[in-house]
């Protein structure tokens, strides 16, 4: 059974804290993605990676960074958390190719107080 | 840049009836891929159905089918014989064809309720 696992289901952090969201996939996929999901806005791409140590900015990268040191792991980093980063964060992975299915993690609900 | 529009924020359907969710997109490309994803309450997003733009035949997966109108840039999802388990957020998504086709561009979603 294919799996994308996010390290936390719920997370509460204080403003200004450095926050790490971890994502691991067991399918040997080349591509990994971080999306942010907000009501009425759908899913917006933050960053993606198509290979180890490679990363590309998505539509809303400001305030975030990523790390991919190993193929199976893709981390999202909030350098200094702010209240407007309170959101649901979804990690996904897929094989190379346009028609390939993206597999999603269960999501991390992050609240910044 | 491509955009995906889902004009129905919420819809409802009676159990066993048929419902159609709308999706339109804007692109200047001739080849691309389209997807419908389902996100049940508190559960993971899963793929419902996919369509390659160069295929004229509409994709079908059991009770789920699409009406792909390339000239109109329309990609609607039809759910037949609706079941309680179909209640979810449904997202339409677009992906570019060819090398570098990495990211999915999503619409804002349609929340589907199924009435017993």
Image: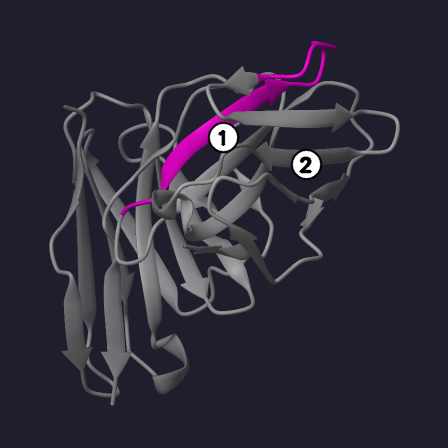
Question: Image point 42% across, 61% down: which residue?
Answer: A37
Magenta stretch encompasses residue B68? no
The local crowd at label 1, few if under 14, some if 14 to 19, many if 20 or more residues have their Cα within 10 Å, is: many
Picture mark count: 2
- Which residue range is magenta in the image? B44-59
Residue A56: give x, y in percent of width and height. 46, 42
Residue A11: give x, y in percent of width and height. 16, 72
Give the residue furthest to the right: B71
- The residue singled out by tag 1 in the image is B102
Asked if badge 1 and badge 2 are on a common chain, one would say yes
Quadrant of the image containing the N terminus of chain A: top left
Residue A77: give x, y in percent of width and height. 26, 61
In the rendered image, the vertical position of residue A95 relative to residue A52, given as above or below: above
* Most foreground residue, A14 or B78: B78
Question: Image point 67% across, 58% down: which residue?
Answer: B8
Secondary-structure class at tag 2: strand
- The residue singled out by tag 2 in the image is B76
């Amino acid at each position: 059974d294919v799996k994308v696992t996010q390290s936390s289901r719920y997370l509460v952090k204080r403003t200004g804290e450095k926050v790490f969201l971890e994502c691991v996939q067991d399918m040997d996929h080349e591509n990994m993605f971080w999306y942010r999901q907000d009501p009425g806005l759908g899913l917006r791409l933050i960053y993606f990676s198509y290979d180890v140590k490679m990363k590309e900015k998505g539509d809303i990268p400001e305030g975030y960074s990523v790390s991919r040191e190993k193929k199976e792991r893709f981390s999202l980093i909030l350098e200094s958390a702010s209240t407007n980063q309170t959101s649901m964060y979804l990690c996904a992975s897929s094989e190379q190719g346009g028609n390939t299915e993206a597999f999603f993690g269960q999501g991390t609900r992050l609240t910044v107080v | 840049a491509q955009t995906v529009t889902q004009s129905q924020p919420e819809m409802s359907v009676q159990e066993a009836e048929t419902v159609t969710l709308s999706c339109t997109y804007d692109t200047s490309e001739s080849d691309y891929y389209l997807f419908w994803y389902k996100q049940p309450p508190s559960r993971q997003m899963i793929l419902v159905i996919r369509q390659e733009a160069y295929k004229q035949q509409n994709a079908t997966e059991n009770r789920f089918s699409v009406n792909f109108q390339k000239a109109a840039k329309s990609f609607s999802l039809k759910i037949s014989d609706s079941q309680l388990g179909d209640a979810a957020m449904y997202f339409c998504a677009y992906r570019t064809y060819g090398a570098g086709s990495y990211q999915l561009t999503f619409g804002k979603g349609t929340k589907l309720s199924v009435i017993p």
